[in-house]
Amino acid sequence: MQNETHMMLRRITALFITFVAAFNIVACTTTQTTDSANQNSRVSIIVIHHTTANFGDSLQILTKPSSYPVSSHYLIPEPGDPTYGKSPLKIFKLVDESRRAWHAGTSYWAGKSGLNDQSIGIELVNRTWCHASDTGVNPYTGGPDRLCFYPDFADGQIALLTELLDEILERHPDVKPTHIIGHSDIAPGRKIDPGPRFPWQRLASLGYGAWYDDATVIQYWERFRAEPLPLINLQKALAAYGYEIELTGEIDEQTRNVVRAFQLHFQPWAVTREMTRESAAILFALLDKYYPERLDELLQVEEPLDSTAPCENEQVDEPEMTP
């Protein structure tokens, strides 16, 4: 009996020694973290949207499975929305910043395409709406015949947005002012959100995003009065700022769409789809401020002035909320 007890103890001891050895082997192979200095955030762009739908519908669209799935990293309600309730406004986080939200769709900015991979998407509830005519076709433009209305963004929403932007920029400090942009900037042929009422200038004055200096705009406005630039130079300037545009030297549809996107962001009181002298002066004032190294090249006139007549004014239409 005593011998059996000793044998049992030896077996237990042997098992214990084997366990300790195995533990030490595992411990020796555990991953050790050593942070490299050669890295940065994958996030380089912040894209701001508006939903056109109320909070309840927006939350449903952005979070539930559908035949055309869409999402964003954040959703900010607006006060007075009966589908939200009477509780204080708060930011809704829908997708972790480390993961890809499906908000940008076919998109481009500053040499990069497919921007879902490198951006954070923020949706603001803003119930834009349009009234369509009986015929549905604008007799002057051939496009949709709509009368659209764009509500202001509530102060409470913008306060939450600036709070969120502050936190995002703290986590992703490499995001440039010129890379805080709207959906219309990255998809000018498809989108117009966050629309002509979004307060880009106000945000920039608080340190979020880009804006121009008035005195610099005046300088370029006077310069272009005496020496107007060919359209090809203006197309190159829009591309240098970040927009995707084909350098055709013509006032074609893609140029009109890009000019509209630019005006929605930086000249919302005059969304004409025409590259006017004021628009050109604002564009070069922005380049002067953020990309001064490109100015000499962009101001160099190599071709005669384009004689194509300016395009007609056109009402901005409102699309559905899709990536």
Image (cartoon, rainbow, N blue to C red):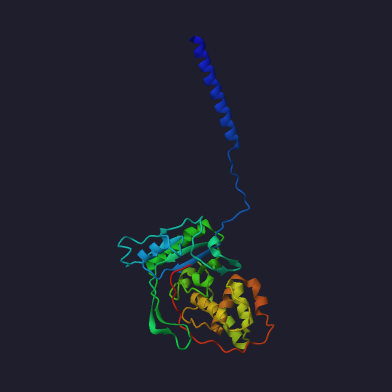
208 with respect to 40 (left or right): left
Q: Tell me where residue 230 appears, x and y as whole percent.
A: 63, 84
**In the figure, 80 relative to 280: above or below?**
above
| Quadrant in the rendering for residue 127 | bottom left
Q: Looking at the image, which residue is at 65% across and 71% down? A: 293
161 with respect to 39 (left or right): left
96 with respect to 309 (left or right): left
- Can you name the residue that lies furthest to the front here? 67
Residue 261 in sight here: yes
**In the figure, 105 relative to 275: above or below?**
above
Q: Looking at the image, which residue is at 46% across and 60% down? A: 73
Q: Tell me where residue 320 appears, x and y as whole percent.
A: 43, 72
Residue 206 in sight here: no
- Report the front residue among 40 and 116: 116
- Report the front residue among 135 and 260: 135
Q: Tell me where residue 269 appears, x and y as whole percent.
A: 46, 80
Instruction: Please give the count of numbered marks on the rendered protein.
Output: 0
Q: Looking at the image, which residue is at 53% across and 58% down? A: 172
- Can you name the residue that lies furthest to the top here? 2
**In the figure, 84 relative to 140: above or below?**
above
**In the figure, 41 relative to 29: above or below?**
below
Q: Tell me where residue 77 appears, x and y as whole percent.
A: 38, 64
